[in-house]
């Protein structure tokens, strides 16, 4: 099955710890994105990558880091510098170039700081 | 400032009834407008994508309209079903292919 997979579905983090959220896609998409969703707010862009070995900060990149060593994978690390990490995190991918391309989302990871 | 505003924030309807969700945007430049359905605890799934020249687009019981002059869109759901209970998110793609998300309308369909 083609698609975009996020893991784990639920993640608990102690304060001061770094955690890494996984995002894998087998759609052969060049572009991948990480969003954060908080109650009552629209999705906000954390980081995006348009090609392997390249990524750009989004609107709320502070306290997060990413890597794009492979086309299929775009892991997000939530560092201890992120002051309010409890949220629902969504990964998405799309083909590169044309502006009307479909964006496909993973099922999300809910991160809770305990 | 690029913004997408949706109304109402939440809505309760009875099964079988129709409803209309609203989306106003101030995004410029405008590339396209999308409606997504998001079930609780899941990722959004695309319903429609409309470009500047498209006024209406249907996907089964979902019909989206776009008025690019007034920068308004609506999503009409016909003959609602219990499975329509979800959040509906309006998304506008602007310059540099950036997606601007609305906060969503939470729809509850009751039997």
Image: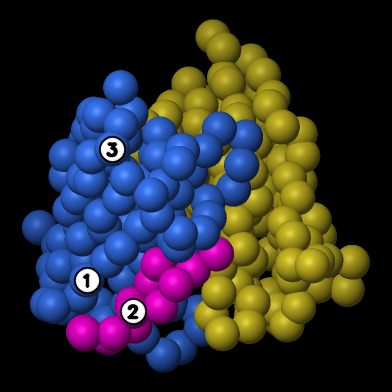
Q: Is residue B79 magenta?
A: no
Residue, x 38% and y 72% (percent of image)?
A48
Residue B60 visible in the picture:
no
Of the two numbered discs 1 and 3 in the rendering, the one whose residue sits closer to the viewer: 3
User: Marks 1 and 3, Cα distance to the nearest angstrom?
Assistant: 21 Å
Point out the tag, 3 or 2, that comes first from the N-terminus. Answer: 3
* Disc 1 element: loop
Provide the letter of the chain coloured yellow.
B
Q: Which chain does tag 2 point to? A: A
Residue, x 31% and y 71% (percent of image)?
A32
Co-location on one chain, circles 2 and 1: yes
* Disc 2 element: strand
Q: Which corner quadrant holds the N terminus of chain B?
A: bottom right
* Disc 3 element: loop
User: Is A108 placed above or below B93 here?
Assistant: above
What mark, if any, has residue A53 been given in the picture?
none
What mark, if any, has residue A67 been given in the picture?
1
**The magenta segment:** A47-59
- Provide residue B64's location: percent of width, then percent of height: 66, 56
Quarter of the image where one finds residue A107: top left
Q: Which chain does tag 3 point to? A: A
Q: Could you tell me if the residues under marks 2 and 1 are in contact, i.e. CB atoms within 8 Å? A: yes
Q: Which corner quadrant holds the C terminus of chain B?
A: top right
Residue, x 51% and y 26% (percent of image)?
B85
Disc 2 target residue: A55
Judge the density around disc 1: few (<14), some (14-19), many (≥20) Cα neighbours within 10 Å.
some
Co-location on one chain, circles 3 and 2: yes
């Amino acid at each position: 099955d083609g698609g975009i997979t996020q893991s784990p579905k639920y993640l608990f983090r102690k304060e001061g710890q770094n955690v890494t959220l996984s995002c894998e896609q087998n759609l052969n998409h060049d572009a991948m994105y990480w969003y954060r969703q908080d109650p009552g707010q629209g999705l906000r862009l954390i980081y995006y990558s348009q090609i392997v070995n390249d990524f750009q900060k989004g609107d709320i990149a502070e306290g997060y880091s990413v890597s794009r060593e492979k086309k299929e994978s775009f892991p997000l690390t939530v560092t201890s510098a992120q002051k309010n990490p409890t949220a629902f995190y969504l990964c998405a991918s799309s083909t590169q170039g044309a502006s009307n391309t479909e964006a496909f989302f993973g099922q999300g990871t809910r991160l809770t700081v305990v | 400032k690029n913004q997408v505003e949706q109304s109402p924030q939440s809505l309760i309807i009875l099964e079988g009834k129709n409803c209309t969700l609203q989306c106003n945007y101030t995004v410029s430049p405008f590339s396209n407008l999308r409606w997504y359905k998001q079930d609780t605890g899941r990722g959004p799934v695309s319903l429609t994508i409309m470009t500047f020249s498209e006024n209406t687009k249907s996907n089964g019981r979902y019909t989206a309209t776009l008025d690019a002059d007034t920068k308004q869109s609506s999503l009409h759901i016909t003959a609602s079903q219990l499975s329509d209970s979800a959040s509906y998110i309006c998304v506008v793609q602007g310059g540099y292919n950036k997606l601007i998300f609305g906060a969503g309308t939470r729809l509850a369909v009751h039997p």
